[in-house]
Image (tube, rainbow, N blue to C red):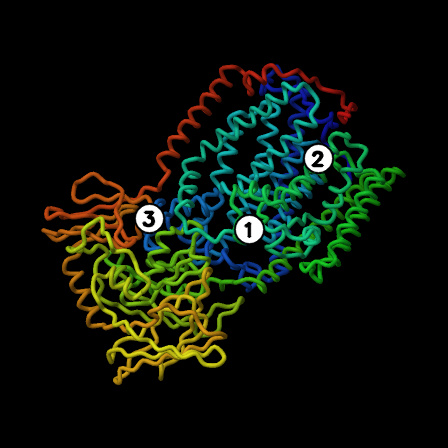
Amino acid sequence: MPPAAETVPDRGEGARTEAERPGAPDGGGSRPREQRFLVRVRRSTRVRAAAAAALLTCLVLCLGGLLAGSHPFGPTTRNTVDLGQQYLPFHAHWRRVLLGQADGDLFVNWSAGFGSNFLGDYGTYLSSPFDLLVVVFPADRIELALYVITAAKITAAGAAMAVLLLRLRRGPWQVAAVLGAAYALCGWTLNYGTTVPMWLDGLLAFPLLCLVGEWARSGRRPVLGPLVVALAWYANFYTAYMATLGAAIVLTVRLLTEPGPARRRLAGLLRASRAVLLGIGLATPLVLVIYLATKTADPTPEVTFTAVAWTEVFARLLPATASVASPALFIGTPALALALTLPFNSTVALRTRLVWTAAIVLVALSLQWGPTHLLWHAGASPNGIPYRQAFVLCGLLLIAAWLSTARGLPPLPALLGGAAVLAALAFAARGSLVVDRWTYPAFAAALALAALAAVAVLLARRYAVGVKALPALAVLLLVVAQAGEAAVTGGRIAELSLAQVHWSPRVGPWQEDMRRAVADKDAWPRHRTDPGELPGGNDVLLVGGQSSEYYSSLTAESYNRTLSALGFGFWAKGRHLTTLDNPVTDAIFSIGTRMRSEPAAPVTPDTLPEADITVTDTPVPPLVTVRPDVRLPARGTDFGESAFANQELLLGSRVYTVPEQVRRTDGPGGATTLTASCPAGSGVWLWAPELQATAALAGERPVSFFGGLPSVQGPMRTLGTVPASGSVRVELRGDEPPSLPRQPLGCLDRERLDTAVRQLTATGATDVRVSGHTLTAELPAGSTGTAVIAVPRVSGWYCAAGGAAPTPAQSYLGLLAVPLDSTTTSVTCTFRPPGLRAGGAIGAVALLVLLALGLRGRLGGGRGGRFARRAPRVHLESASGSSDGK
C-alpha cells in the first residue's frame, strides 16, 4: 500500500502530540506553528478520507441496485418483508406529521390501529435525523425518499469509519477510505440493513461511539462525547446498545494496548463511562417511552437460540451469500485478507496483535453462544434475524485490517499467513447452502486483484521503481476489487431476497387512486373511512383514512386481544392487525365509509396495476356512544369463545343467529361439509381463525381463508346469503381436515343491526372533535351510564367527564370508557405516552450535569477536567522518528 501521504509517522499506541494533550490550548499564538500545521494536516487527511469513503460507498451501493434492477434504478420492488409493510408506510405518515397533514400528532396516530401510540413508533422507526429528509420529497415519491435516507445512512457510516481508522492510527487516507466503504457495505448492511433501515443508525453509531472512546482516552470533548452517545441512542436505541457494547470492546483493547500508567487508563475508562451514562440519560425521554411500550406490546412466541454450523459462519465471510439465519460477515475479500494478516504482522507490536486477535475471536464466539447471544440482544432472543449484532464484528475485522496495513503493505510472511487462513475458510465453506453460483467466482476475482495490488507495492518497495505510480495502481486495484465484489454481492442479495421472502409491490396507481378516493370521502372524526385491503401492509398510512390495519413491534397486546376476539385477522404473530370488512364491527368502530378494491391485472414485483375501487357509505353511530345500562367496572363482561357473541356484546344488541347445531362431515382429501339452519335472507359469516382452505356457500363463489396460528389468524369472512329454504351448506376444501371453533357459523340480520345503529346514534355524542392527541365529545343532556369511545384502551390514556380532573382511562371490553352521571354533558380523553414524564426528568438531570461539566471545563481553562490536567506531557517527535510501542 502507498505510504501515509501527508501524515506524520505513528508514534505507537496511545502516544499524543502536544496539540492532542488533554488540557492543551485550543489555538492562539501560544501553540507552536509546527503543532498547528500538523493538526491541520491531520484534519485535512480525515476530511479527504471521509469524503472518498462516502463517495465510494454511495457509488457502489447504487451500482448494486442497478445490477439487481431494483427501484430506483429499475422496475423491481425493494419492498421485501418489513421494508414495505412497516418502514415505507411509517415514513409516509411521518412526512404528513412533519407537514401538519396527518390525523394526529407526535403522540397519537389516528390513522392506524384505530388510534395508536405514535411516539413509541416514532422512536422505534423514525427518530433518526436522516428521516427528516422525507419532507424534501413529494408524497408520491416516498419510495425514493426512503431509498435516499437508506443510502445517506450507509454513506455516513462509511465516512465515520474512515475517520475512526485514521484516529486509531495514522496511515494512507486512500486505504482508510476503501476500508471505511467496506464497513458500510458489509454483508450485514446488504443483507439486513438495506431492508431494515432503522438498524442502519447502529451501523453509523459504532464508529462514532468508538470515537467517543478515543476522546475519553485523551480527555477531549467532554461535552460533545455525551451528545454523540445521546444522538446514537435517540436515533435507534436497539442497535445503539449493540454499538455501545462494540465500542466498549474497542476501548478496552485500546486501554490494554496503550503504554503508560494504569492511573491514566483508569481515568480514560471513567471519562468514557461518564459520557455513556450522560448520553443515555439525555436520550431517556424517548428510550423509556419505547421500553414501556414494549412491555405492553403483544408478546411474540419465545425463541430459543440455536447456533448455526461454523460452515455457515465461514460462508458468510464470502461474497454473494444471503441468509437471515446466519451472521452476514462479508467485508470484501481484500479487506478480509488484510485483517487475517494481523496475527502474523511483525511490524505491529506483539501485544497489539495478541489483544486485537483475541478480541475478534471472542466476539466471533460470542455470536454462537447462548448467554452472550442474549447479552448482545439485551436479554431477549429476537424473532427473525438472530445475528443482528454482526455489524460489530465486521467493524472489528476492518479495524484489524487497518492496523495491519496503516504503515504499508504487511511483510510477505504475514501476507502468506493471512492468505493461508483465508484459503482454509473458503475451503471450509464450500458445502454451505448459502453459497451462490457467484460466490467463488467473485471471491477469486477479488483475490486476484488484491494479489496484483500486493505485487505492485512489493515491486515498488524492492526495486524502487514506479515509487508513485505502482502504489497508486495498488490502491486502484484495491478499489476495483472491493467495489466490484460489494456491488455483485449487493445485487445478488437483492435478487435472492426477492425470491425467498414475502414482498410488497411498488407504490403505484392502486395506492394513488385509493388516496384520491379516500381524500374525497374522508369525514374524520365524524366517522372513519377505511381504505380496506390493499396490496401491502399498513397501507392506510400511505393512502389515508382510519383503519384497524396496524403493523408495529409495539402493537399493544390489549389491542390484539380485543380485535382478535371480534373476528379480526392478524399476521406476524399478532403484531400486524388487518382490516375486517364486517358491518357489525364497522358500526362498533364508526366506519361510515368503506373502500373495496381489486387489481385490474396481476400484481408482480415489477408492476402494480390500477384497481377497480368501489365506495360504500353506511350510517354508523358516532365515535362516542352512550350505554345507559353499562356500569363500570363492568364485571362479568369478558369476551367469550364466540366472535359473533363478542361483537354483539360490544355492540349492545343481538344481531346474529348462531346455529346451535352445526353438522360437520369430513370427506376424503381434506374436504369438509358444514350444514346448519338460519333465517332466510340473513348473511352467512364463517369464523375459522386457523382455517387454511377455501369455503363456499352452496351456489356462491369460494372464499379463501389463510389462518395458521400462532403466526397468522384468518379474519371472519362473509360467504353469501341464506336461501329461502333456510338451509346453510358450506364446503371447505383444504389439504387436511380443518380445526374449527365451536361456533364457526353466524347469520347476520341486517334489520336488527340497523335498529341497533339507530339507537346508538340517537343516544350518542352530538359532536366529536379531535385535536392532536386529545378527543372531546359533547353528549346529550341527561346522559347516564357509560360513554364508550371507539378507541382501543392502551396504556397512556387519561379521560374526564365534564370538568373533572383527568384520570387513567377505564376500559369496556378493550375500548375507552368514561362513567357518566346525569349532569355530564361532555367527555375528554387525552393521550400521554407512558414514560414521557419520568424520562423527561432523567433527561433534564443529565442535561444539567452536562452543562455543569461544560462550564467547569471552560472555567478550568481546558478540555478534560481534573484527570486531563494531570496527564503527562508528550512532546513532538522529529518527522523521522516513530515507534511501535513494542
Amino acid carrying label 1: it is Thr
Amino acid carrying label 2: it is Trp
The answer to whether residue 805 is seen in the rendering is yes
Q: Quadrant of residue 260?
A: top right
Residue assigned mark 3: 794
Please report the residue visible at 71 percent of the width from the left and 36 percent of the height from the top. 358
Residue 304's disc number:
1
Element at label 2: helix
Residue assigned mark 2: 356
How many labels, in total? Answer: 3
Which mark is first along the chain, 3 or 1? 1
- Give the Cα distance between marks 1 and 2: 31 Å
Quadrant (top left, top right, bottom left, bottom right) of the C terminus:
top right
> Above or below — where is 768 with respect to 221?
below
Please report the residue visible at 61 percent of the width from the left and 16 percent of the height from the top. 29
The answer to whether residue 488 is seen in the rendering is no
